[in-house]
Image: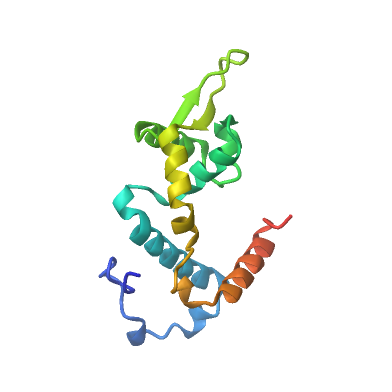
Amino acid sequence: MTAPGKRRPWLVSSKSVDLAELADTLGFVLRVALVRVFERFFDRFGDEGLRSGEFSALLLIGTKPGLRHGGLARPLWTRPAHMTRMIRRLKHQGLLVRDIPEDESRSVTLDLAAAGSAFVADQRARHSGANDDQRHNLTPTEEREIARLLRKSTGLDR
């Protein structure tokens, strides 16, 4: 894992600033956690040229071939314009196929290309952190509990 601040040298060492008040707020702690998660993601996938939401998109398309842009954007909490750019990028990389159904010419469906299916199959364990001994400095049980609480907090558990 990248040392804190290594990619962001402009960050001030937390030892020189009292974070006590902020460290007890959910928003600040989530922000720091998210930055750390993204650092770990780029440590794993930076050499692949993959962006953080793209693997999630590939996973969802792989589980539901024929998914439409909107059907992908909503569960990923992504704006349609951002989703369109992401889809173009994945298509350009040869990981995704866009198709216009004969019965509805104004719509586009999404499927994994053969390279996309192979990539997802090959990288699934790496993405989920399987065999990762650092697991965000948490035990697997603690990580599952935080994920459970965040799903509850965000309504994703419904």
The quadrant of the image that shows the C terminus is: bottom right
Q: Is residue 12 left or right of residue 139?
A: left
From this view, report whether residue 77 is shown above or below residue 125: above
Task: Work out which residue is located at the far right of the displayed protein and give it.
Answer: 158
From this view, report whether residue 20 is shown above or below residue 143: below
Toward the viewer: 76 or 103? 103
- Residue 47 is situated, as x and y percent measured from the top left of the image, at 29, 52
Q: Is residue 88 visible?
A: yes
The quadrant of the image that shows the N terminus is: bottom left
- Residue 42 is situated, as x and y percent measured from the top left of the image, at 35, 58
- Residue ID at (35%, 86%): 15
From this view, report whether residue 118 is shown above or below residue 9: above
- Report which quarter residue 153 is drawn in: bottom right
- Residue 7 is situated, as x and y percent measured from the top left of the image, at 28, 66
- Residue ID at (55%, 80%): 24
From this view, report whether residue 77 is shown above or below residue 34: above
- Report which quarter residue 74 is drawn in: top right
Toward the viewer: 78 or 101? 101
Q: Is residue 85 visible?
A: no
Task: Work out which residue is located at the far left of the displayed protein and give it.
Answer: 9
Toward the viewer: 21 or 9? 9
- Residue 139 is situated, as x and y percent measured from the top left of the image, at 54, 77
- Residue ID at (41%, 86%): 18
